[in-house]
Image (cartoon, rainbow, N blue to C red):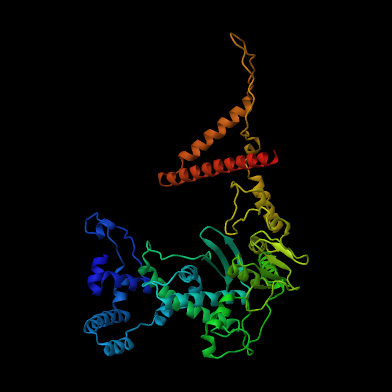
Amino acid sequence: MSRKQALKKLQLTLKDFRRLCIIKGIYPHEPAHKKQANKGSTANKVFYYRKDINFLAHEPIINKFRDYKVFLRKLNHLKAKKEEDKIKKLYDNKPIYNLDTIVKERFPTFGSALRDMDDALSLCFTFAMLPHTRVLKEGMIDSCRKLTAEFMHYVIESQSLRNTFISIKGIYYQAEVHGEKITWVVPHERGLPHVTDVDFTVLVTFVEFYIAMLGFVNFKLYQDIGLFYPPQIGQVVEGDEMESEEYKEKVYSLAKPLAKRKDVEHTEDDEPLDLLGEDSDALAQKVKEAKNIKTLFKGCVFYLNRECPKEALTFIIRNGGGVVGWEGAPNDLKADSKNITHHIVDRPMDKLEVNRLYIQPQWVFDCLNARRKLPTERYMPGVALPPHFSPFTSEKAGDYIPFERLEELRSMGKDVSELEAAIPKTMDELPMRRKEVKPEKPKGIHIAVGQMHKKSKEKFHETVEKGQELKMRELMISKKHQRVYHSMKTTFKRNRNDALKLKKKAKLVKATAEA
């Protein structure tokens, strides 16, 4: 069914139809026989499954859309008459719709909701940093800020953060929740102007659904580990105090631990590794990594200078069992405290204390990815930082892998012999881009001494036979798979050439630095 036919059947405008499809999770599909579905026409059209449109026809939220249009018509009529009392009464009876039933319908199990958390968190973190506009209502942005802070608190309390990476887009995080890996990106902390080149009307509908979804997910996660919901810091507080701006700032700062219910038994997850089944080695490695992350910064007290990204550093440090503070932090940690072990700065320092380590922010991110506390000499203020590698990429044979990455993989206990063996031999024989001194040619007629070029007949015949055998095997491939084979072959050659170029560039940079 085309979109025009669907609009006619549902009696909706295009704007309301888009909102309904986003909320219900209905997406267009490409028909197998597009020309036949389009009745012989070749024009571009959007098609939907007929069963999906019939499913939308029975949705009660359609009546709410129509009631809201009636509300707007009455509101314009009363505003023209300037009847303020009736306008106020009309606003009190404004039609609203609830998405709770749709959330339960789309995600019948908790695991299915967790698998769809990536986009929800990324979009809500983005909206939490946007300014208020006519489309982006204040309540929506505040809800995004509240729900994202609650989720970060859960990750801290459960110590489930596993990987992080700083990119141009923002900071990527990956947490393991109930066995599901959830990856999201948080924009960098900076002031944003009013964005005019983005159509927020579609994104607002997504955020509206994700707010309802995150409310359910956060409540379930908090109940699982025995936390109060909404989150409470320290002792139990009443509802009026929780609505104050001062209390909200304490929650958003992530600096203080949350209060837990006393009726919940706290169990340790340290199980004997010989009872883990057949894949005991892999699971033992996974359990060991999780334990290393939970005790990564245990016993360490961090103080952040005001130029450092507080939310990101607090999130990672507290996930690793550390204590963190800054000027004006809720835990009242002072800059001259004797308990501070690490001082994170991102600018030159005039005065340095003897009894603490001074490091740059990248040290915290690299320690989490390495599952251990790295040496601080390469991260001191004013020192050129080492490369920051992404933990989300997996190296395979034939790729260009920098020397620093190989050393990092070795320190994590991984076998890199296959990666080193896969490096082409020609890499070590690549010529350097240096100015070579050419011998001057004598003027006039001269005779150059020739050299004999010897060929091994056995090697030559062996190479020819291998090439012919490969050609014969390529001819046996069916036409259906020949294009895929040639595409794979081209990709392999391109990756090999890129690896050779990067290796050559790395050698040139190293030679220049040594010179």
> Picture coordinates of residue 148 (x, y %)?
52, 74
Left/right placement of residue 35 relative to residue 433 reads left
Q: In this image, 109 relative to 354: left or right?
A: left
Vertical placement of residue 342 versus 74, above or below:
above
Residue 51 showing in the rendered view: no
Q: How many marks?
A: 0
Of 483 and 397, which appears nearest the observer? Answer: 397
In this view, the residue farthest toward the right is: 354
Compared with 328, 410 (above or below) is: above
Q: Nearer the viewer, residue 201 or 99?
A: 201
Q: Is residue 331 above or below residue 368?
A: below
Q: Is residue 324 visible?
A: yes
Tell me which residue sits at (32%, 58%) in the image: 32
Quarter of the image that includes the N terminus: bottom left
| Outermost residue toward the front in this view | 350
Give the residue displayed 46% in from the left and 65% down from the top: 192
Quarter of the figure with the C terminus? top right
**Quarter residue 235 falls in:** bottom right
Q: Is residue 101 left or right of residue 260?
A: left
Residue lying farthest top?
Answer: 445
Residue 223 location (% of width, % of height): 56, 83
Give percent across and percent down for residue 23: 37, 74
Residue 300: image quadrant is bottom right
**Residue 141 percent location from the top left of the image:** 45, 74
Residue 345 or 258: which is nearer the viewer? 345
